[in-house]
Amino acid sequence: MKIYNHDDLLDVFLDCRAHILSDCFAPSSGWNYHLRLMICLLEDPGKLYHEYLQEPANRKKDKNFKAQEKGILRYEKLQNNEEKQDDVNSKNSRNQNNKGFWRKLILQTLEESKKTWKEKSCCRKESRLKHSRKVDMVHFSQDHEIEGLTFEEFVNCKFNYCKDQMRMHVVIMHTHLPSSVISPRVVKMMIEFLELLELLDSLFHAADEGLSNAFSQSMDAKQFKLEEAREHCLQILKLLHSKFTLPDISGVSKIKHFCLENARLIFCTASSSAKLYAEDMLRSSLEVLIIDEAAQLKECESAIPLQFPGLRHAIFVGDECQLPAMVQSKISEKAEFGRSLFLRLAQLGHKKHLLNVQYRMHPSISLFPNVEFYGKQILDAPLVKERSYEKCFLQGKMYGSYSFINVDHGHEEADDRHSQKNVVEVAVICEIVAKLFEESVSMKETLSVGVISPYSAQVSAIQEKLGKTLSRASGSGFSVSVRSVDGFQGGEEDIILISTVRCDLMGLVGFLKSPQRTNVALTRARYCLWIVGNGVTLGNSDSVWERLVIDAKARGFFYNADEDECLAQVIIAALIEVGKTDHFPNAHLVLFKSARWKVSFHNGFSKFVTRIKTMEICKEVISMLKKLLSGWRQSHKGRDPNFTNGASSQLLEQYKINGSLYLVWTVDILEENACIFQVLKVWDLLPLSEISNLAKLVDIFYGKYTGDQINRCKLRHFEGNLQVPMTWSVHSNEHSKDDPVEFLSIQFASLNLLD
């Protein structure tokens, strides 16, 4: 388990806790040491100062350092006088904020401890965790005392140092010691003691007299409050000393042993529970065993914790309708080696308690799994039925709460490990994720997306293609997780996209047939579940997927991917990339179905796109065609010269696509439903040097047209800056020459500046 990636789990991770606790157990710098030191300091500071003066080894002889330190202490005193004056005058206010203060202190201390442990663990250091604390710019410890401090400076430093160390130890012990070792009453005493220390400190800094005078035997009325706080502190400290001291142990392994011996709750994996037997770590018997994900645990693994001495109750939590234990060997699988004890007990008729309310999925998502896997026994919680739970992340019915997005033109292939992938579905998935990312950023919303596929090759292909989107998503509140079905068990995201991969007319779907695997995939989404797959393949699979496709069609949630122009474009680009454009021969009808102009391709669209070698050129060509079909035209100044001399010279247009290729097209006419109308005819994508040869072909093609037909091809009609197609009735063609005005207008309109 990658524990380093889960900061919230470090608070319960035994290795981390033992390292952090080692600071409290240290004999010469831990809790017991500082408890005795603080008692001595409050009772008889003169004795400590005398010992300090008698031990030259503990002092530094650098006079410059001494002078600097005294200056720091004077600065500290002035600062504290300013900052803490208000604390003495507003004790009630401080008590009101007490809970918030301790919560903040605990969180801050724990974060510092976890960060330190992670740094040391990553460096593989086995040395004891050291906690460095700052005392208002003064570093004071047993090994780094200062030569020549006055009595007041010495007591001040010692007091602040002890106060900070004890505060840190209280937080650590309260968080990481077993509750059987440190009772709530003791913790309450510790917190009360720390509050008194803060009060004592503020009273000292607010007073004119120094701490040394406050600890002297002669007390006047002005020092009464200070003395009262000191006496109260000593009383609690001595009570703590009698009620709670840490055992004399050191070393991380012994501390771990101590924690386990006194633990009341132990969280571990089934296999690691065997460690509890190793050195008889359990001082008292465990009475209750709870096994989570029990349906995914092999019987032999369940037997490990079930042998704990003294067990009175065992509770198995799991779902046999989801993934079972992983077994690689087919022989072992047939022998039911992967069967869980949970499943066996269920098959033997033991009573189960069904948790029959789901709090995750929108009702339109939960409907099919509930019917298919749970016999309509699961209820939707009121939360998921609220209107606010119905989210709209992208425009279009296809992107509602639940949809099956049919990709008819997929291309399935196997990698060298015989895992399947479908590059067209990869393109569709990545396009949808990219659109979600853009929408999330523009709306400044946090959004989590999960992409699930049963095949590792597909997972890798999607991760690779999503690389740029994932890098841009860093720090934006948008997250994408791409995993296999097995890797997603127990997980959930706002939106789930499923890539089913398989594209086989015979309906062969391999291990996609597994109902447990399907159930896991279908139940991970909160707000939206979009299934991307081949409807024909899954509809012929004789599996749960066949019923899913039928259900999606019956409920009106079945959509074709190419209904979305952006998806149609990436589908074509993906097919071009793998050289399978014949899979989608009428793609242009989908791509340009909403265009103002109709389009036809010489020798068909499939042969046209074979001239396109890269996805970048494909996108540029499609973009240019969309502009042309909307009515946009280049000015003659911006066009490349036309080198043809025949009849085609008045019809042929050539627009540069990139540095070397030109899109060559003409305006043609078609007759349909008793109407003649103009269309845009695309001839080819060619380098400039080959256009003259194409022009000869165009001359031959239009050489069969009558003069009237040629004139209709040359006619131009504009609405603003956009050229729009013209339409005539078939019958108007018979009488146009009989009407001299109409005939003249056709001739005049067919003229252009190149004539």
Image (cartoon, rainbow, N blue to C red):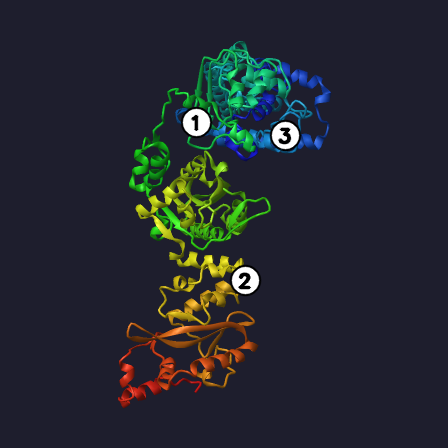
367 sits to left or right of 464? left
Q: Are marks 2 and 3 in contact (CB under 8 Å)?
A: no
When the figure is inspected, residue 24 is found, relative to residue 500, above or below; the finding is: above
Q: Are marks 2 and 1 in contact (CB under 8 Å)?
A: no
Residue 160 location, x and y as percent?
57, 24
Question: Nearest the camera: 485 or 287?
Answer: 485
Report how far apart the C-alphas of labels 2 and 1 lie in the structure: 50 Å
Residue 345 location, x and y as percent?
43, 21
Label located before the other in sequence (2 or 3): 3
Residue 466 location, x and y as percent?
51, 50
Residue 614 is marked as 2
Looking at the picture, which amino acid does disc 1 mark?
Gly
Residue at image position (31%, 89%) is 744
Label located before the other in sequence (1 or 3): 3
What residue sits right under mark 3 in the picture?
A: 70
550 sits to left or right of 122? left
Residue at image position (39%, 82%) is 705
The quarter of the rendered structure image containing the C terminus is bottom left
Q: Are marks 1 and 3 in contact (CB under 8 Å)?
A: no
- Name the residue furthest bottom: 740
Looking at the picture, which amino acid does disc 3 mark?
Lys
Label located before the other in sequence (2 or 1): 1
What residue sits right under mark 1 in the picture?
A: 318
The quarter of the rendered structure image containing the N terminus is top right
